[in-house]
Image (cartoon, rainbow, N blue to C red):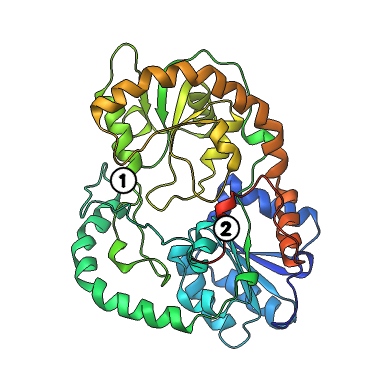
Amino acid sequence: MTNNHRLVVNECIWIRSGVSDEQYIFRSIRNALIERGLTVLTLNGPKDSEGLARIRKAVWDSDAHVMLDVMMADELNALYPVFKDRKHFSMGLVDWWKSPFWFTKNADYLTFRNYNGIAVRRGLASFVGNRRPPLFSLPENMDTFQWVSTGLRLPALMAAPLLEIRNWWQRRSESILPERMYYFPFTLAAEHVPLQRETPEFDFCNVNSTRGYWVLRDPHASAWLNFANLYHDRARITGLLQRARNPACKVFDVRHDGRLDWDGYCRVVRQSRYAISTGGLHQNSVAKYTEFACLGTPMFGEVLPFEFPWLDECLFPVDTLNVGPAELKQLLPRAMEQQPALRENCLALREKLLQFYHPQRVLDLLQEQADGKPIPPGYLKPAATRENL
């Protein structure tokens, strides 16, 4: 496939991260590809020498286009010697801001689980905008990466001016056209979000991470945000709700009330009147939005600017970064009053969402875009179709 040809999903060699595929939202796409009879190769980390050898042989023995999907940054770096001369590949991006620039620059097509990656490149938004994180954010547990990120925050700030100059040059050298960027949303399967009747145990639950630190390798993400906590909004609203704790406001917080396996995660969500949900300071379309809705639990948090137009029917909106304790106290009775109706909306939407985000449907959606068809209604908001600012 040359740069003048469209992407054909069913004719690609798919290379995927075995690390990422441990999560069902990615593994479900792997299973869907295998159901279609496609070649799916796995790299289990950057030191997987056998996997690297298999991939090198497969891609150099074929002229098929390659889709590098849900790959970790260090895995992509390990694949660089394989593709630096061959190229002829596209990228399936999740946390697009952490991908090595050489790969996003040289890809024929970029596909994004999060539409904000397309919006930023089209000039519709900046990565974080004015939703700034605190300068420093202390770890909440003994996780090594959290402590390393905290320690590197000051050096990252000192290096940011030089890195921003590099980012400017890299943005100038990137030539991907808007029509070669596709929306490839997270998937959802009914068996992963079992709907059962539960007695409410909590008014709110936080089952999200509240510490989101990254090395921002993409030039469209500001270097000033390296090792900043992009999940500060989740931490703030959860903390406010906990401090408002009283007999009428019981909060489950995964940070303090215990880690959950998947069954436990689903059970706690179903046992909660509201699930705290935000996309982080970068307003990311995390899969939890669809999971919560399909588990029948409305959300307390923020809508997204570009995705999930159905979310307004399932969410009680709150300005997580600016709401104060007094205002939040006034909002809580209204939230509880509206909760039954929002729950019914979630239940009514369940079958529609399971169809929208079924793995095979998502693969078809990717192909439809490659064929020049518009994204059907229901996936994106009108803001996503605006002309460049």
Question: Which is more toward the observer, 220 or 96?
Answer: 220
Q: Residue at x 49, y 20 (%)?
A: 338
Q: Residue at x 35, y 40 (%)?
A: 234
Vertically, is 104 above or below 248?
below
**Residue 376 seen in the figure:** yes
Badge 1 density bin: few <14, some 14–19, many ≥20, Cα 10 Å: many
Query: Is the N terminus in the top left, top right, bottom left or bottom right quadrant?
Result: bottom right
Among the 4 quarters of the image, the one containing residue 115: bottom right
Front disc: 1 or 2:
1
Residue 173 image point, x, y percent: 47, 84
Q: Residue at x 60, y 38 (%)?
A: 310
Vertically, is 174 above or below 17?
below
Q: Secondary structure at mark 2?
A: loop
Badge 2 density bin: few <14, some 14–19, many ≥20, Cα 10 Å: some
Question: Which is more toward the observer, 189 or 47?
Answer: 189
Sequence-first tag of 1 and 2 = 2
Q: Amino acid at mark 1?
A: His
Q: Amino acid at mark 2?
A: Gly
Count the marks: how many?
2
Left or right: where 190 falls relative to 248: right
Residue 159 image point, x, y percent: 23, 73
Q: Secondary structure at mark 1?
A: helix
Residue 312 image point, x, y percent: 54, 35
Residue 232 image point, x, y percent: 31, 45
Question: Which is more toward the observer, 157 or 342?
Answer: 342
Question: Which is more toward the observer, 232 or 138?
Answer: 232
Q: Provide the residue designation for mark 2.
A: 18
Q: Are marks 1 and 2 in contact (CB under 8 Å)?
A: no
Question: Which residue reaches farthest right?
Answer: 37
**Residue 46 seen in the figure:** no
Q: Provide the residue designation for mark 1.
A: 232
Among the 4 quarters of the image, the one containing residue 157: bottom left
